[in-house]
Image (tube, rainbow, N blue to C red):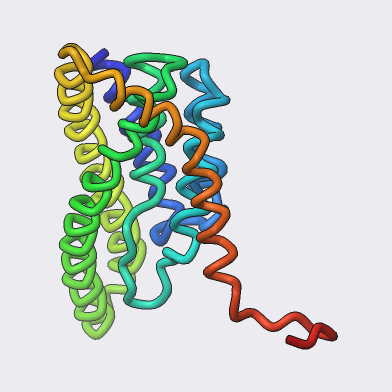
Amino acid sequence: MIINYMALSFLAAVFSSDITMFGQFMISRPIFCGPFFGFLLGDIHTGLWLGMIVEMVWINAIPLGCAVPVDLTFMTILSVIWSTVLFRGSQEIAVFALALAVPFAYIYKEVDFAGRLFNTKVMHWVEHGIKNGKEKRISKGLFFGLLFFILRTALMYFLFLLLGSIIIKKVFATDIPIYIVLALKKAWYYLPVFGFGMVLNNFKNIKIPFIKR
């Protein structure tokens, strides 16, 4: 499992780099990375379902300018991997994994913020080099900035995957009250409804041409 988590963490870091570091091909969106990792791990249905929920509930969390929203890619990939690797096909595990991934994603947000401060120092190093005729620092700065991002993100994925696996196994190894299990199973179907409500709420102020209110 350790080797698998290492490989998945590196791949997940590459997907996360699509948010602000490189490309922006939209592969980092939950509706894509969720089913993708679900497919890799043999449960595309769970990956699609979790990705859809995260996409709808946090659809307005977009990194614009200096804004650092919660990392939806981090949240989605963690929950999908936990759900498909530990207890494949279990709806209550999937819901619990998603709930566990939310605080982890907010913790990673702080790590990402610190990483951006480091990138600012790299940018100043590049600017200082340009003033002294060292234009090669531009490519070096881009390379090392991207490399640092992927390495620290992969490390965070790996650590949280291990920690989350331990928590989930410990929780579900105990005798959980049946009403909690049933509540988690119901949440599997209620969460998309809640997500659709969030979508409607986020777009309620959009004006559609030729339609009067």
Q: Is residue 8 left or right of residue 148?
A: right
Q: Is residue 90 left or right of residue 105?
A: right
Instruction: State the image quarter where residue 211 is shown.
Output: bottom right
Q: How many marks?
A: 0
Q: Residue 43, percent across and down?
A: 52, 19
Q: Nearer the viewer, residue 114 or 56?
A: 56
Q: Residue at x 51, y 56 (%)?
A: 23
Q: Residue 15, percent across and down?
A: 43, 43
Instruction: State the image quarter where residue 175 is shown.
Output: top left
Q: Of all residues shown, which one is farthest toward the front?
A: 179
Q: Is residue 126 left or right of residue 60?
A: left
Q: Of all residues shown, which one is farthest toward the right?
A: 210
Asked if residue 54 is positioned above or below residue 21 in the image, the reply reads above
Say which quadrant the C terminus sits in.
Answer: bottom right
Asked if residue 180 is positioned above or below residue 204 in the image, the reply reads above
Say which quadrant the N terminus sits in.
Answer: top left
Q: Residue 115, percent across and down?
A: 20, 60
Q: Residue at x 45, y 31 (%)?
A: 186
Q: Residue 99, percent across and down?
A: 30, 40
Q: Is residue 29 left or right of residue 179?
A: right
Q: Residue at x 16, y 71 (%)?
A: 121
Q: Residue at x 14, y 18 (%)?
A: 170
Q: Nearer the viewer, residue 193 or 65?
A: 193
Asked if residue 29 is positioned above or below residue 140 in the image, the reply reads above
Q: Nearer the viewer, residue 147 or 50?
A: 50
Instruction: State the image quarter where residue 48 is shown.
Output: top right
